[in-house]
Image (spheres, rainbow, N blue to C red):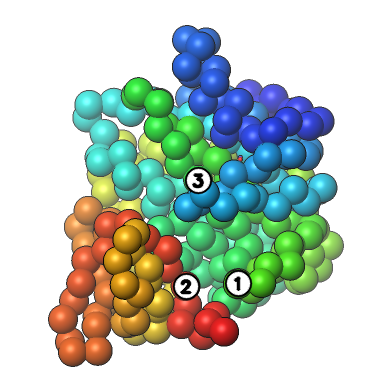
């Protein structure tokens, strides 16, 4: 079921609150807003409130038999990738960037924010369908750069179905096939990345795939491969 709201602060905040209040929030249900007055991005950033864009959240209830919950970022990223790739004239211009951004022509098209409350993980997804924000520090793009923007409600229906499919695959076949598919949908191996792990110095290195837990592997200039479990990642060419 998809519940549409004309306006709210943040669909993630709304679902987290429902979970905290003990409301029954079932997997597969979505909250989608036309406008978000306090949209949240990763790392405490705000998320652009673009009318006509997709802004929605859903809940995944973690089960004991599930692969590690942190790998849901990859599952959600694949769901967004598969939804968008079926709609665009330049599928080769799409690339996932760790941990959970979707790039189009190297610019940010979509982002995902995971927030946990007990055994519930709220998965919030923002996709620039018609409008992209002007940001000082990163390039952004909307699907309308390639042609008419997809209808938001049709997009929501396709994404909800795709996330269901990816969750089934994750639970049935485990993490390794998801990691392989994620790597195939990502920018090329060797892509130069600039990584800011929390509280540490910026690292420059080359994309060396993901490890078996889904963490980012970065080949440093001295050849060492560093495993990154958290942080902000930019394509090095996005700098300056
Ligand atoms: C990112 O910084 O890349 C993550 C952006 C996540 C934005 C979405 S829009 C719907 C949901 N509600 C929010 O407040 N944030 C997420």
Report which quarter residue 231 is drawn in.
bottom left
Give how far across and how far down residue 204 sits, in percent. 34, 81
Asked whether mark 3 and ligand 1 are closer than 8 Å, the reply comes as: yes
Q: Please report whichever mark, 2 or 1, sits nearer to the chain's N-terminal start.
A: 1
- Separation (CA) of disc 3 from disc 2: 17 Å
Which one is in front, 233 or 79?
A: 233
Q: Secondary structure at mark 1?
A: loop
* Residue 182 visible at all: no
Which one is in front, 67 or 192?
A: 192
Residue placed under numbered mark 3 in the picture: 113
Residue found farthest to the left: 224
User: Is 44 situated above or below 207?
Assistant: above
Give how far across and how far down residue 215 sits, in percent. 27, 59
Marker disc for residue 53: none
Give how far across and how far down residue 20 sits, in percent. 47, 17
Marker disc for residue 138: 1
Which one is in front, 230 or 128?
A: 230
Q: Residue at x 42, y 63 (%)?
A: 232
Asked whether mark 2 and ligand 1 are closer than 8 Å, the reply comes as: no
Residue placed under numbered mark 2 in the picture: 234
Q: Residue at x 63, y 33 (%)?
A: 11
Q: Mark 1 Cα within 10 Å, few/some/many (few <14, many 20+)?
A: some
Tell me whether circle 2 and circle 1 mark residues in contact (CB < 8 Å).
Answer: yes
Left/right placement of residue 231 relative to residue 23 reads left
- Separation (CA) of disc 2 from disc 1: 8 Å
Left/right placement of residue 76 relative to residue 198 reads right
Report which quarter residue 1 is drawn in.
top right
């Amino acid at each position: 079921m998809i519940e549409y709201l004309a306006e709210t602060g943040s669909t993630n905040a709304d679902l987290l609150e429902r979970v905290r209040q003990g409301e029954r929030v079932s997997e597969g249900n979505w909250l989608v807003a036309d406008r978000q007055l306090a949209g949240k991005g990763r790392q405490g950033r705000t998320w652009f409130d673009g009318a006509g864009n997709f802004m929605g959240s859903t809940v995944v209830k973690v089960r004991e038999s599930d692969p590690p919950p942190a790998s849901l970022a990859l599952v959600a990223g694949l769901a967004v990738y598969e939804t968008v790739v079926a709609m665009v004239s330049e599928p080769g211009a799409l690339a996932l960037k760790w941990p959970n951004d979707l790039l189009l022509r190297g610019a940010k098209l979509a982002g995902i924010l995971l927030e946990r409350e007990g055994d519930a993980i709220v998965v919030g997804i923002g996709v620039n369908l018609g409008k992209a924000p002007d940001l000082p520090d990163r390039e952004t793009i909307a699907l309308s750069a390639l042609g008419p923007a997809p209808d938001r409600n049709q997009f929501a229906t396709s994404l909800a179905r795709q996330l269901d499919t990816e969750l089934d695959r994750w639970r049935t076949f485990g993490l390794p096939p998801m990691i392989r598919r994620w790597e195939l949908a990502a920018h090329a191996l060797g892509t130069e990345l600039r990584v800011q792990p929390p509280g540490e110095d910026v690292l420059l290195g080359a994309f060396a795939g993901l490890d078996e837990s889904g963490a980012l592997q970065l080949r440093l200039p001295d050849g060492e491969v560093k495993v990154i479990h958290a942080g902000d990642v930019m394509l090095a060419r996005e700098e300056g």
